[in-house]
Image (cartoon, grey):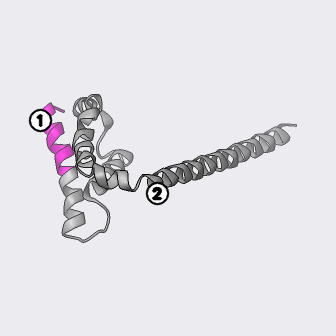
Amino acid sequence: MRIPLQIAVIFAICLSGEFLNRVAGIPIPGNILGMIILLILLCSKIIKPEQISSVSGFFLNHLALFFLPPSIAIMTVGDDILSQWPTLLILCIVLTLITMAVTGLTTQFFIGRQEKRANIKNERHH
């Protein structure tokens, strides 16, 4: 697919996510809905990764540019953030610990499942 068509496809998917958010009233941000739509289209093979690879590769290579607007917005409310630093620090620490615990438990669960399946297969062959 040519680059202008790839851009049009990705832009149309983004717009459809915004449409669902604003017009249909789905309470999920439009950009997230757009990513979900893209995931569904890719998983159902309606869109093949090769069809959007040039533009998506460009976006991934220049991903840092997409962080500029939020970074600048954070800088404009810097005083508010500094006044709340103890709360933010505690939140960061607690949420990091929760994330680590959930990740560890999930990993242990899946490893245990995989080991049980391997044991069942070994018992069948003996």
Q: Percent position (x, y) of residue 39?
A: 35, 48
Secondary structure beneath disc 1?
helix
Between the residue at mark 2 and the residue at mark 1, the CA separation in whole angstroms equals 46 Å
- Label 1 belongs to which residue? 4
**Quadrant assignment, res 111:** top right
Label 1 sits on what residue type? Pro
Is residue 108 depicted above or below 19 in this figure? above
Is residue 42 depicted above or below 1 in this figure? below
| Magenta stretch, residue numbers | 1-13
Q: How dense is the environment of label 2, judged by Cα within 10 Å: few (below 14), some, or many (20 and up)?
A: few
Secondary structure beneath disc 2?
helix
Measuring 28% from the left and 48% from the top, which residue is drawn there? 74
Label 2 sits on what residue type? Thr
Nearest the viewer among 85 and 112 is: 85
Q: Percent position (x, y) of residue 120?
A: 79, 45
- Label 2 belongs to which residue? 87
